[in-house]
Amino acid sequence: GVDQSTEIDPTQRVATQDGRSPSPILATTFSDELAISSGGESKIFSVSIKDRGAISLAGHSGKAFWFSKFQSEFVTSDYYYDQYPTWVNDWNQKGVTEKYSSTRWQLSLPAEKYTLQETQQHFKVDLGGFKRTFPHPYGPSSYPYFSTMLTLSPAGDEITADFASSLLEHEALGQGKATDYLAISFSSNDYVIHMYGPASLETEDNLIRLDRTIADLLDNIDQKVGLDNTLIVLSADHGVPEAPATVNQLGSPQAQYFQQDTLISSDLLTRMDKEFGLNKDAIRLYAHPYIYLNHTVIKDKGVELEKLQNMMAEELMKVKGIAYAVTSTSIEKNRVPDTQIMTMVKNNYHPKRSGDIYIIYEPRSYINDMEGLTIASMHGSPWRYDTHVPIIFSGYSINSKNISREVTPYAIAPTLSNILGITQPSGSIGEVLPEVTN
């Protein structure tokens, strides 16, 4: 279940129905191919405080668990289980989250020890009384926002690791002949940066604590399975920009926040009415980075979609802070420049899912009002700060070295497939990394 009144994640707050599954995933995943190659013998699991973080990593063949802020428990869906495993019920009944009740997230080191000596705090978010600055009170477990506060702090990753350790033990991972797979998405860092920005004490302290959490988890894996028998891969799905106020203070005045209503200007609505006889009903929604139009309304008016898209893109390009507005029709007809940025826009396009106009903001400018939730930082652009992520392979006789050439996370699945000698995922487009496999 989702409690919209206390949900911080816009994708969850606007959900119209319960139930989660991998049905939207259009291709096989690495975990699917592992299941196929082992004839179903491989044990495949994933864990995250976010449902999508767990489901995408488990694929169609694995089992996914995620944290319900509504229930303050780890949950799954009937896609995966008819009944919860006993150990999951036992973990939930232990009340692991209770130890945070009426406590506070405080700095783990003296303030002067931190690299990020923040100079501005006004853009940081005080959500539900969690405060803009340290210490951050979780409140009692009876507080409606209590579970939400856990996810906005290192506690979210700590309870994720605790649940994953219980899974490791009770599902006896790594104890059979087949290769088993455990994917863990540590997602609190994403929420922390959204609320406080990357140049905040909160972000640095969260990373310090996450480092300890991962170290403890690896110690547990070493005891239960042995790190010599384990291949570890660490990466991320996106980077993050600094808050505009921080960038502006350092001499880059172009960075700015946007409100969603800035996109639909009076000039745009006037042209829609004058040129096409349309009003705001022709615009369904903005879901970053797309504007979605109401094709039924447009068709009923006899309006040519491409002409409307082109006019809207033209008006959007007049808005200060918008670098590009790219129509879906121009992508379909291959009428976009052959540049690195536009290649990424084209790669992101799917005819049945993408919107009508793809908006790219100027560097470090972005919408910070997501369905009524004001945030400090937002990812999702094609600029370098958003696409620069680490990829780390460790274990399985991999030699230690730093590699500076440019690769992408697309390479992870084919590289893992190569190591195990199994088929790559059906939609795989990445390279096999020779530095890892040779």
Image (cartoon, helix red, strand yellow):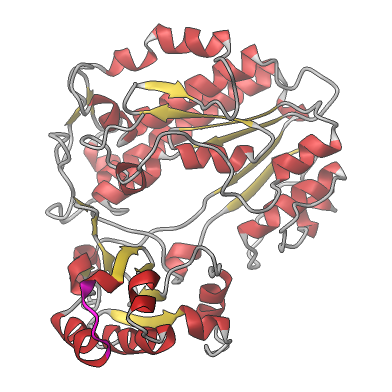
Q: Residue at x 78, y 38 (%)?
A: 34
**On screen, residue 89 above or below 9:** above
State the image coordinates of residue 356 (x, y, percent, origin top left).
42, 74
Quadrant in the picture for the N terminus: top left
Q: Residue at x 42, y 28 (%)?
A: 67
Q: Is residue 396 visible?
A: no
State the image coordinates of residue 396 (x, y, percent, origin top left).
78, 37
Q: Is 208 in front, or is 288? A: 288
**On screen, residue 381 above or below 207:** below
* Range covered by the magenta-colored residues: 276-280
Q: Residue at x 44, y 81 (%)?
A: 327
Q: Is 336 in front, or is 338? A: 336
Q: Main secondary structure of the magenta part?
A: loop
Q: Residue at x 22, y 63 (%)?
A: 246
**On screen, residue 165 above or below 297:** above
85 sits left or right of 254 in the view: right
